[in-house]
Amino acid sequence: MEQVLPPSTASGAGFEATRVRQFTVFLENRVGRLMALLRALEETDQRIYGLSIEESADAALVRVIVSDPDAAKPFLKQKGFSLSVTEVLCLELPREAKHPLQAICSCLLSGELNLHYTYPMHQGPTGPAIVVYVDDPTLAARILINRGFRILSEGDLRVNSPDGPDDFEPPDETE
């Protein structure tokens, strides 16, 4: 059952799910394969919010957070990419906290939660943010919200969301 917690997701309506879908894409360790994935995401007008690569000699696992997973998933499968979907928490890092990562770890420790992995988001809707994968995301979300952290929902990451950034222009590569 999907857990919905009020009202501390970043958009604040209280009806958004507290988890964001992350794709884990299997890539053969071949030249240009990551670029093919990024181009495929670009074809569906996806904004990439988070990207983490775990590579080995034969293959790489690419974890990616995109602006519209519903549109991206069937398109990536059609393009021949093998992927799985995992629900993760995306947390804004509080700007006023001196050690926000320690504060997050302390919250998770208080709930005796295992932090399996984390990686930074390239951009959050309003500032720095991180992706965390824990063994009990519902409990983690409750603890983090109760401690004042803002959790991003998928609605916060949509390109055309009123709270999501949609004015990014890449730099001109000819300069």
Image (spheres, rainbow, N blue to C red):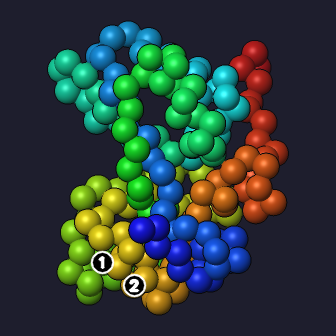
Q: Quadrant of residue 85?
A: top left
Q: How packed is label 1: few (under 14 Cα within 10 Å), some, or many (20 or more)? A: many
Q: Secondary structure at mark 1?
A: helix
Q: Residue at x 60, y 57 (%)?
A: 154
Residue 92 visible, this orientation: no
Q: Which residue is mark 1?
A: 108
Q: Is residue 97 above or below residue 88?
A: below
Identify residue type, mark 1.
Leu
Q: How packed is label 2: few (under 14 Cα within 10 Å), some, or many (20 or more)? A: some
**Residue lying farthest to the top in this orientation:** 31
**Residue 141: horizontal and vertical position, in percent?**
43, 76
Identify residue type, mark 2.
Ile
Task: Tell me, yes or no, whether the two marked residues, 1 and 2, touch with CB atoms within 8 Å.
Answer: yes
Camera-nearest residue between 94 and 56? 56
Q: Is residue 140 left or right of residue 59?
A: right
Question: How many marks are shown on the rendered structure?
Answer: 2
Residue 58 visible, this orientation: yes
Image mark for residue 143: 2
Q: Quadrant of the N terminus?
A: bottom left
Camera-nearest residue between 111 and 118? 111
Q: Quadrant of the C terminus?
A: top right
**Residue 168: horizontal and vertical position, in percent?**
76, 42
Q: Quadrant of residue 136?
A: bottom left
